[in-house]
Image (cartoon, helix red, strand yellow):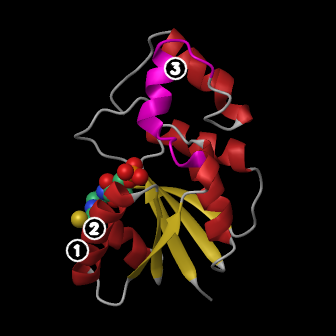
């Protein structure tokens, strides 16, 4: 039984993330989507909202579990008995920073592999920070986030309802 973790901030989930979750789910028996809770960093959506949004966008997937985690992703991997970490890469810059992180994680938890999945071409330019900017200025979110989340994300920004989460 292979278990993989797919850690991230998912603040908020994008179409690129959803595509990676679906593809990663086909590479292992169990995929744990880890939503980072960082008390020292402000986020636009609370960890629970981010978990709920992933559930709503993903629907029922038998082999995908969504959890919150704080601290190092290797601790999540250890706790879940995962043999590899999935990370998406959108280009050369991502590859450079992700390689450094993969190396550090291998030193922290020997034997833990990192598998890079290239972003699908149509999602290469999408990021959560881009989505937040577009939402802040009332832009059309449909090309960027799952349809089920468009209204919730737009409403959060429209109401100016950001918070520390
Ligand atoms: O896709 P994101 O939002 O950039 O993901 C960032 C994330 C959550 C993977 C990263 O910030 C993280 O896991 N932080 C926890 C600390 C950690 O384990 N860092 C890597 C070891 S150096």
State the CA–CA distance, disc 2 to disc 1.
5 Å
Q: In this view, does 92 lie above or below 53?
A: below
Q: Where is residue 87 in the image (x, y as percent from the top left)?
A: 45, 64
Q: Is mark 1 within 8 Å of ligand 1?
A: yes
Q: Range of the magenta residues?
A: 123-140
State the CA–CA distance, disc 1 to disc 3.
34 Å
The residue beneath circle 3 is 135
In the rendered structure, the answer to whether residue 42 lies left or right of residue 63 reads left
Q: Is mark 2 on a helix, strand or loop?
A: helix
The quadrant in which the C terminus is found is top left
Q: In this view, does 153 lie above or below 117?
A: above
Q: Where is residue 106 in the image (x, y as percent from the top left)?
A: 28, 81
Q: Does the residue labelled 2 lie within 8 Å of ligand 1?
A: yes
Q: In which quarter of the image is residue 101?
A: bottom left
In the rendered structure, the answer to whether residue 91 lies left or right of residue 126 reads left
The residue beneath circle 1 is 104
């Amino acid at each position: 039984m292979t278990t993989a973790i797919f850690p991230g901030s998912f603040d908020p989930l994008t179409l690129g993330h959803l595509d990676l979750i679906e593809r990663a789910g086909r590479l292992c028996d169990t995929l744990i989507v880890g939503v980072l809770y960082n008390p020292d960093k402000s986020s636009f959506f609370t960890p629970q909202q981010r978990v709920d949004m992933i559930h709503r966008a993903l629907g029922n997937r038998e082999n995908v579990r969504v959890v919150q985690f704080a601290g190092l992703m290797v601790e999540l991997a250890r706790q879940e008995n995962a043999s590899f970490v999935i990370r998406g890469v959108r280009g050369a810059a991502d590859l450079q920073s992700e390689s450094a992180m993969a190396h550090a994680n291998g030193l922290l938890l020997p034997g833990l592999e990192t598998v890079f999945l290239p972003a699908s071409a149509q999602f290469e330019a999408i990021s959560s920070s881009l989505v937040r900017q577009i939402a802040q200025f009332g832009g059309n979110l449909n090309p960027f986030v799952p349809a089920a989340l468009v209204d919730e994300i737009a409403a959060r920004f429209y109401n100016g309802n950001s918070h520390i989460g």
